[in-house]
């Protein structure tokens, strides 16, 4: 029986099949059940989880479940905070232009401050972009579920992700960020050109290392 069949109708799967799930597969199904509020799924997964000598739920699964739950809260907090900071910076920039009627009415100090805010806005866009895409990759590659499933079990998870997706749909801002990442004489066609997605990949590698270190430390 395939794992896809298990996902479709977990209630009807024989106990011995569930008992043979690996800790990784059990965690993936647990996260999906939590996101869908399938209490029966969760109960079945916990009840059929192998019992070791320590007479408790399989330690490898338990530690993964606990760590995924802790990281979920931390991830949502970081994403939400980065989103709010980006929105605040953009609103400040828009107010500057409204109050001055455009660049021609700016004093030199106001123009310098406007440039600083534009740079801050690009930096915060980059922060949110790399956080979002690195966490998405981590969720899919390590936890085995999409980001919406992992964070969706939190009351605010889906809403935060929807707003972030809209905020990041800005190709011009992304181009400006990548220009900041590269020398002024570099071109996007150059082999050495650094993209914002490459920065997100680096953050993803950090999350993998952290996850592996904690799991190794907590499990025999």
Image (cartoon, rainbow, N blue to C red):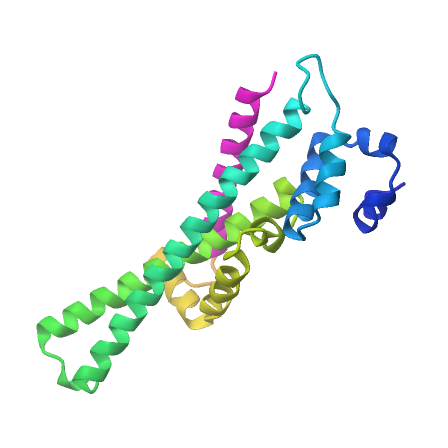
From what the image shows, is residue 210 above or below residue 82? above
Q: Which residues are magenta?
A: 191-220
Which residue sits at x=45%, y=71%? 170
213 or 126: nearer the viewer: 213
From what the image shows, is residue 94 above or below residue 46? below
Quadrant of the drawing holding the C terminus: top right
From what the image shows, is residue 19 above or below residue 92? above
91 or 12: nearer the viewer: 12
Give the percent coordinates (x, y) of residue 124. 34, 59
Give the percent coordinates (x, y) of residue 174. 43, 65
Which residue sits at x=59%, y=48%? 150
Quadrant of the drawing holding the N terminus: top right
Q: Is residue 35 left or right of residue 171?
A: right
| Magenta: main secondary structure | helix
Q: How many marks?
A: 0
Q: Is residue 194 magenta?
A: yes
Give the percent coordinates (x, y) of residue 184. 32, 62
Which residue sits at x=42%, y=56%? 80
Q: Is residue 119 left or right of residue 83?
A: left
């Amino acid at each position: 029986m395939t794992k896809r069949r298990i996902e479709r109708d977990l209630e009807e799967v024989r106990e011995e099949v569930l008992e043979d799930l690996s800790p990784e597969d059990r965690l993936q199904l647990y996260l999906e059940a939590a996101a869908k509020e399938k209490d029966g799924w969760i109960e079945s997964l916990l009840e059929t989880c192998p019992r070791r000598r320590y007479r408790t739920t399989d330690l490898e699964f338990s530690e993964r479940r606990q760590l995924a739950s802790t990281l979920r809260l931390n991830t949502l907090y970081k994403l939400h905070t980065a989103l709010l900071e980006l929105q605040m910076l953009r609103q400040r920039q828009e107010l500057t232009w409204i109050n001055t009627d455009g660049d021609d009415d700016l004093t030199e100090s106001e123009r310098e401050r406007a440039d600083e805010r534009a740079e801050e806005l690009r930096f915060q866009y980059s922060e949110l972009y790399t956080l979002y895409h690195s966490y998405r990759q981590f969720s899919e590659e390590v936890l085995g579920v999409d980001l919406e499933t992992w964070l969706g079990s939190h009351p605010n998870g889906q809403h935060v992700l929807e707003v972030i997706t809209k905020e990041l749909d800005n190709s011009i801002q992304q181009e400006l960020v990548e220009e900041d990442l590269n020398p002024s004489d570099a071109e996007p066609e150059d082999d050495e050109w650094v993209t914002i997605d490459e920065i997100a990949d680096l953050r993803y590698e950090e999350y993998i290392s952290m996850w592996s270190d904690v799991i190794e430390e907590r499990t025999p």
